[in-house]
Amino acid sequence: MTKRILLGMSGGVDSSVAALLLQEEGWQVVGVTFHLWGDGHEGEDAAKVCAQLGIEHHRVDWREPFRRQVVEPFVEGYQRGETPNPCIFCNRAIKFGRAFQLARELDCQGISTGHYARILQREGEWVLCQAVHLPKDQSYVLYQLEREQLPLVRFPLGELSKEEARELARKRGLVTYGKADSQDICFVPQGDHAAFIQEYTGLPLEEGTFVDGEGRVLGTHRGLCRYTIGQRRGLGIAWKSHLYVKALLPQENRVLLTDREEELFSAALAVPRPHWLIEPPRGPLEALVKIRYSHRPASALLHPQGDGGVLVEFAQGQRAVTKGQSAVFYQGDRVLGGGIIG
């Protein structure tokens, strides 16, 4: 009997090509569009592709759990002076959380998305790996998958570049082949986090002060959530040299600035609650560590702590380590785990 697989379909070219490739592998594809925010028009393109390929299509309304498990932590993180990555929350709670329950309800034996990553079997175990085409690799936002989920997950695009995926869609005549890529957080379409938070909470952003390392007031900021570590542009301060955001101080509603860029570099960071895709190490472990989605992995030593946390010690200091972002651990192309930077 042909195995059924649930494919999360946004209506974009990536999930459309994933459907095509899964079909060619012999899966009976069940396309599902998750209505997470807004009016849900994205399901229309997904339905068209499913009709083209002759596969069933479902649409589920998960706006409330998405708001509760993704949007709320995003807003609360910014209010704490952090810079959260909501895609990581979403993959954990929605796309590989609730979706697994839905897959069981739809009698599916696997689950898939259009992410650019790979799950491989090496030496008898299933491992999460980077995509072959590193510029598009999305393994960073997938580190919170559970180990027991890995044998059940397929990432058909892991061997392709974005250009190859789009060309395949064009050759096969998929209606989404020319659709533009989404560049922003799905619920912050213009990329203006501050405006979204203000609208979502219904509260004005509270102004505060810019200060230097000696506590001297340098100016007035327009709300903590407008700033992130390492930021130079958009501060609105005329100064004799470049100023950078060194720290956010939410308890005092202050933004600490420095004119010394070298002060933005950190030799270490803490991950209080790591999530592992390997057996948790008992001693120091060499790894490459990414501290944000676009960061080039840096050599580091992972030091397990007695409370279950991890101290990450870098071989060379890293610029703009930011609370709320994730530190993701790699060896070669394999994801070992990661966690929110504390």
Image (cartoon, rainbow, N blue to C red):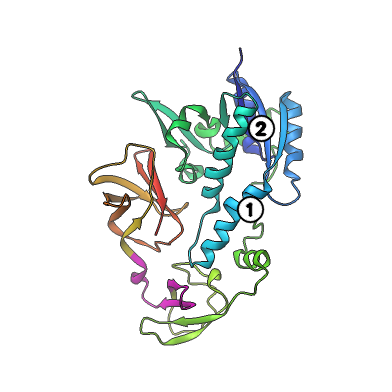
Number of the label disc, if any, that sits on residue 163:
none
Q: Residue at x 46, y 59 (%)?
A: 324
Residue 47 percent coordinates (x, y)? 75, 34
Q: Residue at x 50, y 82 (%)?
A: 209
In which quarter of the view is residue 249 placed?
A: bottom left
Task: Identify the residue at the far top of this view.
Answer: 1
What is the CA distance from the residue labelled 1 to the residue labelled 2?
Answer: 32 Å
Q: Residues within 10 Å of mark 2 (few under 14, many from 20)?
A: many
66 or 212: nearer the eye? 66
Residue 111 percent coordinates (x, y)? 57, 30
Residue 84 percent coordinates (x, y)? 51, 58
Q: Residues within 10 Å of mark 1 (few under 14, many from 20)?
A: some
Number of the label disc, if any, that sits on residue 67:
1
Q: Is residue 174 visible?
A: no
Quick one: quadrant of the C terminus? bottom left
Task: Identify the residue at the far left of this view.
Answer: 283
Say whether residue 218 is left or right of residue 214. right
Q: Is residue 229 above or below residue 260?
A: above
The span shown in magenta is: 245-265
Q: Residue at x 37, y 71 (%)?
A: 261
Q: Residue at x 64, y 28 (%)?
A: 105
Q: Is residue 262 above or below residue 125?
A: below
Q: Is residue 218 above or below residue 13?
A: below
Per the image, the residue denoted by label 2 is 169
Q: Is residue 4 above or below residue 189?
A: above
